[in-house]
Every structure is written in structure tokens, then in C-alpha cells.
């Protein structure tokens, strides 16, 4: 699925990229390898901080890690007027507050005008076609997963 995602996105030169629920950081690293800069990773599991730092150590793009819950990151960034061209949202499948996070991203102006929000969900879940000021542009299913592309 990650390969398909980046085949769709193509060259990311000059694009700012936010990876929410980063895990090991592989999506953010792939974005950086395709030219995205800056790249920001947000992961609340402090147990992954060492792996994240190791994984990005050799990446030449500007990358920054925030070890905190996504909700807290969104609330803090609203105050700093920080925004991104592409936001990738990959919450754990059991995560129940997806709507709150998506609303925070849209209402908090974390997405640059014309930017894209990509959400990775279980195939059996669905989201509305319009969320705040953004609307569904594409939807791709990959086995038990779905990628939803909003703009």
C-alpha cells in the first residue's frame, strides 16, 4: 500500500509533509526521499523514539519528531500557525477519535490551501465525502485497508 501511495503522490520536492501517528516513520522517510521538506513526525509512543531517531538519522531532508499525542500536537500547532501541504493520518485501527483528529486538522488550519489530507483506515470504516472545508477526491482499497484522499 505504501508503494501505491507514493506512486500516486509522485515527486514531493518542496512539499511540506506531516505524518500523524508515525509509528516507525517509514511513510515520513519515504516522503523525504521523494523531496518533501520539512517533514514532521508525530508519535505518542515514547518506546518508539529511539527507533524513529535512528531511522531518520541518515535522511538529508529537514525532519522533526514530536513525541506526544496527536491531539496535543494539533492543539499546540493551532497557536503557532504551522501548516502543511500534505498531511498523512494513519491512526491505529482501534483508534476511536478519528473524527476529532480530522476536525482538528481542518479547523485548526494545519492544511495549507490546496493541500491534501490522506487518511488510512480499515476497509470496513468509512468517512463522509465532505469534512469541514475539504472534500473526498479519491478512495483506494488495498486488502483490509483504505486510503482516502481529501483536498
Image (spheres, rainbow, N blue to C red):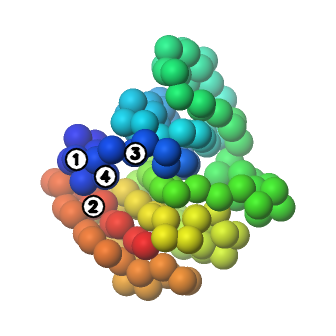
Q: Are marks 4 and 1 in contact (CB under 8 Å)?
A: yes
Direction right: furthest residue = 79
Residue drawn where x is 33% and y is 66% of the image: 148
Helix, strand or loop at label 3? It is: loop
Which residue carries the number 2 mark? 146
Residue 7 marker:
1
Compute the Cα span from label 4 to label 1: 6 Å
Residue drawn where x is 27% and y is 61% of the image: 146
Residue drawn where x is 54% and y is 83% of the image: 133
Residue 102: in sight, yes or no? yes
Which residue carries the number 3 mark? 12
Label 3, residues with CA under 10 Å away: few <14, some 14-19, many ≥20:
some
Compute the Cα span from label 3 to label 4: 7 Å
**On the picture, is 86 further left or further right than 149?**
right
Which residue carries the number 4 mark? 9
Specify which label sits upstream in the sequence, 2 or 4: 4
**On the picture, is 10 further left or further right than 75?**
left
- Could you say where residue 29 lies in the image, as x and y percent from the top left? 44, 31
Compute the Cα span from label 2 to label 4: 16 Å
Specify which label sits upstream in the sequence, 3 or 1: 1
Compute the Cα span from label 3 to label 1: 11 Å
Q: Are marks 3 and 2 in contact (CB under 8 Å)?
A: no
Q: Are marks 3 and 4 in contact (CB under 8 Å)?
A: yes
Compute the Cα span from label 3 to label 2: 22 Å
Helix, strand or loop at label 4? It is: helix
Specify which label sits upstream in the sequence, 1 or 2: 1
Amino acid at each position: 500500500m505504501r508503494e501505491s501511495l507514493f506512486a500516486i503522490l509522485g515527486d514531493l520536492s518542496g512539499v511540506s509533509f506531516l505524518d500523524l501517528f508515525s509509528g516507525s516513520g517509514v511513510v515520513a522517510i519515504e516522503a523525504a526521499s521523494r523531496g518533501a521538506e520539512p517533514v514532521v513526525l508525530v508519535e505518542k509512543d515514547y518506546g518508539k523514539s529511539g527507533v524513529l531517531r535512528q531511522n531518520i538519522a541518515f535522511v538529508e531532508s529537514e525532519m522533526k519528531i514530536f513525541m506526544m499525542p496527536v491531539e496535543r500536537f494539533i492543539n499546540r500547532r493551532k497557536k503557532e500557525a504551522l501548516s502543511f501541504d500534505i498531511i498523512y493520518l494513519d491512526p491505529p485501527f482501534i483508534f476511536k477519535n478519528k473524527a476529532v483528529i480530522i476536525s482538528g486538522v481542518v479547523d485548526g488550519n494545519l492544511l495549507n490551501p490546496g493541500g491534501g489530507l490522506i487518511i488510512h483506515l480499515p476497509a470496513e470504516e468509512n468517512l463522509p465525502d465532505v469534512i469541514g472545508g475539504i472534500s473526498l477526491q479519491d478512495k483506494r482499497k488495498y486488502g483490509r485497508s483504505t486510503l482516502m484522499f481529501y483536498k
